[in-house]
Amino acid sequence: MFDLISFIPRAVVQGIPLLFGSTGETLTEKSGNLNLGIPGVMYVGGISGVIGAFLYEQSLASKADINGFLATMIPLLCCLLGSLLMGLIYCFLTVTLRANQNVTGLALTTFGVGVGNFFGGSLIKLSGSSVPSIALSATSAYFHASLPVADRLGWFGKVFLSYGFLAYLAVIIALVTAYILRRTRVGLHLRAVGESPNTADAAGINVSRYKYAATCIGSMIAGLGGLYYVMDYASGVWSNNAFGDRGWLAIALVIFTIWRPNVGVLSSFLFGGLYILHMYIPSGLNLAVKELYKMLPYVVTIIVLVISSIRNNREKQPPQSLGLAYFREER
């Protein structure tokens, strides 16, 4: 029998990294930058947080001496700095040097995964682990801690209150981003840069500044998805190449949500549910059927993209200058 009470929390947990990634990429794409390096950004965000947590735990005489505030802030700051660096690299290449955005994004993904695997492997050797992974359970406990009343509220507590603080932060960031994009002057300027940088520049808007800011902030948001995956979902265990295709799913989710972060909240949970649906639907020993279930998130994205294209509604189309370099001298 399908256990909905058990399925929903697992779908939410699966969807939180996608929500971080899609929110960050939506903000980036609204400026006209197509950052296909989000998988690499999430990877670097995750390993940066792991490095910070590892060095902090190693500095303690005993695990009992751990400070909850430092155990959460150090990985958070390291994650934000690592993903910010990735955003700056992307902006320098695509905005300043006007390199091809598609190629740069793909290169950034390869670079990010390589950096993560290199430092992850180094930390595993330093820890002397007998298995190809490193566990930071003491730090993870603070990221994974749920609200105290969750266990006393039955199914309501399990469905709505049983998550770590990063899960609620992801929802808040998505809603705030949606508000800024639709209801503020900064959001208006950013959308103008993404739609027509020539017109925005003529109106006195600094196109490069908005592209840099949106891409770097978007990268930091996406990097939090990598940190959440390691510290909460994986309970502080880092293994090389363990992220799977979550970064690519986050990019697909941007299309699914029609570039609206607020829609991404429920959509990410839906994607998370589709991602694990094959574990709940009985398929017997037929592995082919199970693999077909794993395709559901991508099939749904394709269907939404086709429907959006057929309707030809401007509100449901990407920014007009998405993926195009801006040459100010040609204005």
Image: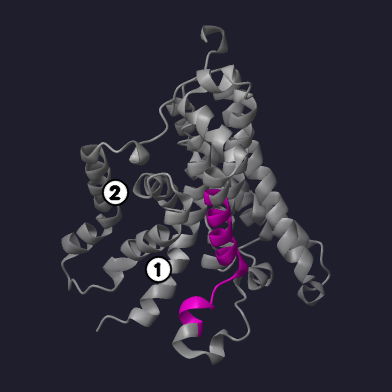
Q: Quadrant of residue 268?
A: bottom left
Give the labeled residue for mark 2. 301
Residue 251 shown in magenta: no
Residue 109, horizontal then vertical, whole percent: 49, 38
Q: Earlier in the sequence, mark 1 or mark 2?
A: 1
User: Which residue: 45% across, 36% down?
Assistant: 36
Between residues 263 and 228, which one lies in front from this camera angle? 263
- The boundaries of the magenta stretch are 157-178
User: Which residue: 18% across, 71% down?
Assistant: 283
- Name the amino acid, label 1: Ala
Q: Is residue 235 above or below residue 240?
A: below
Q: Quadrant of residue 205?
A: top right
For residue 51, the mark is none
Residue 324, horizontal then vertical, whole percent: 45, 22
Judge the density around disc 2: few (<14), some (14-19), many (≥20) Cα neighbours within 10 Å.
some
- The residue at the far top in this view is 329
For residue 11, the mark is 1
**Residue 281 horizontal side relative to residue 250, left or right:** left
Residue 173 shown in magenta: yes
For the question of whether residue 116 can be seen, the reply is no
Q: Secondary structure at mark 1?
A: helix
Residue 309, horizontal then vertical, whole percent: 25, 38
User: Which residue: 52% across, 38% down?
Assistant: 28
Q: Is residue 217 above or below residue 173?
A: above
Distance in Å between CA atoms under marks 1 and 2: 17 Å
| Position of the N terminus by quadrant | bottom left
Q: Is residue 69 above or below residue 206?
A: below
User: Which residue: 20% across, 39% down?
Assistant: 310
Judge the density around disc 1: few (<14), some (14-19), many (≥20) Cα neighbours within 10 Å.
many
Residue 113, horizontal then vertical, whole percent: 51, 42
- How would you classify the magenta stretch by its main secondary structure? helix
Q: Is residue 181 above or below residue 65?
A: above
